[in-house]
Image: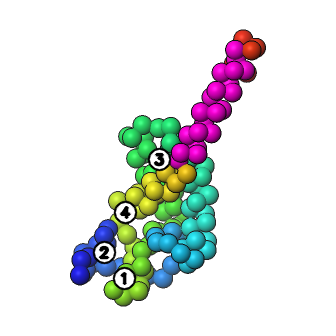
């Protein structure tokens, strides 16, 4: 069996129980219904427009800042071990990957909405001669 991606070496594995501010990696009802995941998705939603219109370098900064914000609120990023069924604390790299995926979710629709806003603002500017 291969080691769990992003998990620390076997002798340093930290098994834990999810707490309300933790973000659970994975899919399904358990993760979607978890309070920490709902809070996480609210945080992510406040940064999506900025993220999709940012450079690759700035996208990494945004994801890293969101991971830190979760940690500052007492949260951790946890993944269930397929071997034991217990929750593991994952490293920051895997937490940033999870965050980046969440930020990209719905990106085409967000880009389209931003383009429409930009086109409307340009049309208004052309009609009024102002940028208000």
Q: Secondary structure at mark 4?
A: helix
Q: Secondary structure at mark 1?
A: loop
User: What distance separates the C-alpha of mark 1 from that of mark 4?
Assistant: 16 Å
Q: Mark 3 or mark 4: which comes first in sequence? A: 3
Q: Quadrant of residue 30?
A: bottom right
Which label belongs to residue 82? Answer: 1
Q: Mark 1 or mark 3: which comes first in sequence? A: 3
Per the image, the residue denoted by label 3 is: 62
User: What distance separates the C-alpha of mark 3 from that of mark 2?
Assistant: 26 Å
| Residues shaded magenta | 107-126
Q: Mark 4 or mark 2: which comes first in sequence? A: 2
Give the x, y percent position of residue 62.
Answer: 47, 47
User: What distance separates the C-alpha of mark 2 from that of mark 1?
Assistant: 8 Å
Give the residue at x 65% y 21%: 122
Give the x, y percent position of residue 121.
Answer: 68, 25
Per the image, the residue denoted by label 4 is: 94
Q: Is residue 130 visible?
A: no
* 2 and 1 marks in contact (CB < 8 Å): yes
Q: Is residue 118 visible?
A: yes
**Magenta segment main secondary structure:** helix
Work out whether residue 37 or residue 125 is closer to the camera in this orientation and state it.
125
Q: Mark 1 or mark 4: which comes first in sequence? A: 1
Magenta segment includes 2 = no
Q: Mark 3 or mark 2: which comes first in sequence? A: 2
In this rendering, position of residue 3 left or right of residue 49 = left
Farthest-out residue, top? 129
Q: Exactly how many numbered labels are in the figure?
A: 4
Which label belongs to residue 4? Answer: 2
Work out whether residue 88 or residue 50 is closer to the camera in this orientation and state it.
50
Give the x, y percent position of residue 16.
Answer: 43, 82
């Amino acid at each position: 069996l291969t080691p769990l991606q992003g998990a620390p070496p076997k002798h340093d594995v930290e098994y834990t129980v999810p707490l309300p501010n933790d973000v659970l990696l994975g899919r399904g009802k358990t993760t979607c219904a978890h309070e920490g995941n709902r809070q996480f998705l609210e945080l992510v939603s406040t940064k999506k427009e900025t993220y999709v219109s940012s450079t690759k370098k700035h996208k990494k900064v945004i994801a890293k800042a969101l991971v830190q914000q979760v940690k500052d609120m007492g949260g951790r990023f946890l993944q269930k071990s397929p071997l034991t069924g217990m929750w593991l604390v994952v490293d920051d790299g895997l937490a940033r990957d999870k965050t980046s995926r969440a930020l990209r979710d719905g990106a085409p629709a967000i880009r389209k909405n931003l383009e429409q806003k930009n086109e409307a603002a340009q049309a208004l500017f052309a009609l009024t001669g102002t940028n208000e």
